[in-house]
Image (tube, helix red, strand yellow):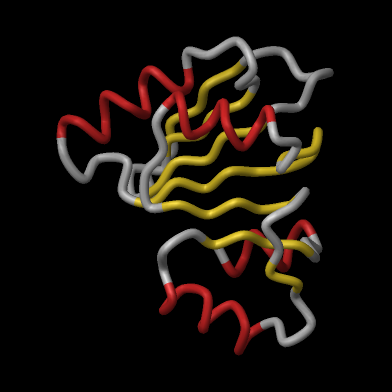
Amino acid sequence: MLKTIRYFGFEKVCIKNNGAVKDLVRQTFPNIQFDENCVDLFFVDEMDIPSFQKIHSEGKLHNNSIVLIDSIYGNKEILQQWNHLIALPEITVSIDMYHCGLISIRREQVKEHFTIRI
């Protein structure tokens, strides 16, 4: 996640329910803004379709936002949530990195799914 923030130059981040990760980001990027509104990076431990649809409909994600989901292979239920989530028409790019998953809603992007084993 730290490399992603640095690479894309993200300024607004939302980290849900993970104080240790939030502290690490704060230490590495002291000027980062932790926000609940429209963010560049949204980090969660898990996400299902209703959770995604809620943050999307509330305008918390913009066209270049990334949602990073931790431990998509944590158990069968989380993996099933991931597979249902990436099937949504709003999700245009998904990257399965085994330890985590990344989704994007870029409207101009053709729907694609990547699997990368890091």
In the image, taking residue 51 as reference, residue 83 lies left or right, namely left
For image coordinates 56% across by 26% down, the residue present is 53
**Does 111 appear above or below 33?**
above
Q: Nearer the viewer, residue 85 or 37?
A: 37
Q: Nearer the viewer, residue 48 or 66?
A: 48
Q: Which of the image's four quarters has the N terminus?
A: bottom right
**Does 56 appear above or below 42?**
above
In the image, taking residue 103 as reference, residue 83 lies left or right, namely left
For image coordinates 33% across by 43% down, the residue present is 98
**Does 62 appear above or below 107?**
below
Q: Position of residue 57 (x, y in %)?
A: 68, 28
- The answer to which quarter of the image holds residue 76 is top left
Q: Position of residue 104 (x, y in %)?
A: 65, 33
Q: Position of residue 49 (x, y in %)?
A: 44, 24
In the image, taking residue 109 as reference, residue 101 lies left or right, namely left
Residue furthest left as drawn: 76
- Mark count: 0
**Does 57 appear above or below 88?**
below
For image coordinates 80% across by 65% down, the residue present is 11
For image coordinates 46% across by 73% down, the residue present is 21
